Amino acid sequence: MLKQDILGVWQLVSCEGKSADGQSFLPYGSNPTGKLIYTQDGHMSVILMNSTRPRFISEDISQASSDEISSAFRSFDAYSGTWELDSNSGKIDHAIEAGRIPNWIGASHPRFISILDGLLTLSTEEFTMGERNWRVYVSWRRPHNNR
């Protein structure tokens, strides 16, 4: 895989967590939305969210309840930073500079990468969450220009 193969904008198709013991979850629901951007000069940005997130009751976000804030936090993710592709290993490394999860800032998050039939799939290394070991698989397609 070459750097040129992944440059540009990608639109989220799916995101699924799969455990080593066969469990699965959809962190952003069955119809997620989001964008992934890789620039030529090595910058990247990603946004993922549940497309059916409930709106806050008030337009004044200072009036949002703890439940509304918690729901919004859990149904959304975003981070940005730099990226580097290792064509030999099939991995791309995201060095996170800003994002929703404070613990990720300054960290490096490698992803396994593949492109098949125009579908870019990034998968995490195995990690522990709760009582299980998981991998998350995120698939992207080039967006259609609807302008």
Image: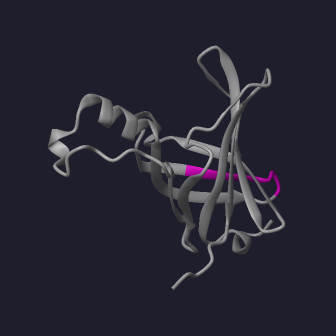
Residue at 51% across / 85% down in the picture?
147
The image quarter in which residue 108 lies: top right
| Location of residue 109 in the rendering, given as x and y in whole percent from the top left corner | 59, 43
Residue at 55% across / 71% down in the picture?
39
The image quarter in which residue 21 lies: top right
Residue at 54% across / 56% down in the picture?
33
Q: Considering depth in this image, is 36 or 145 the residue closer to the camera?
A: 145
Chain part drawn in magenta = 88-94
Verify whether residue 78 appears in magenta: no
Residue located farthest toward the bottom when viewing the structure as drawn: 147
The image quarter in which residue 25 lies: top right
Residue located farthest toward the top when viewing the structure as drawn: 131
| Location of residue 144 in the rendering, given as x and y in whole percent from the top left corner | 63, 77
Residue 5 in the figure: left or right of residue 61: right
Q: Considering depth in this image, is 42 or 9 the residue closer to the camera?
A: 9
Q: Considering depth in this image, is 73 or 59 the residue closer to the camera?
A: 59
Residue 22 in the figure: left or right of residue 47: right
Q: Considering depth in this image, is 77 or 50 the residue closer to the camera?
A: 50
Q: Is 106 located above or below residue 4 in the figure?
A: above
Quadrant of image for the N terminus: bottom right
Residue 49 in the figure: left or right of residue 59: right
Colour scheme: one colour
| Location of residue 45 in the rendering, given as x and y in whole percent from the top left corner | 49, 60
Q: Is 110 located above or below residue 131 in the figure?
A: below
Residue 125 in the figure: left or right of residue 31: right
Number of marks in picture = 0
Verify whether residue 92 appears in magenta: yes
Residue at 45% across / 45% down in the picture?
76
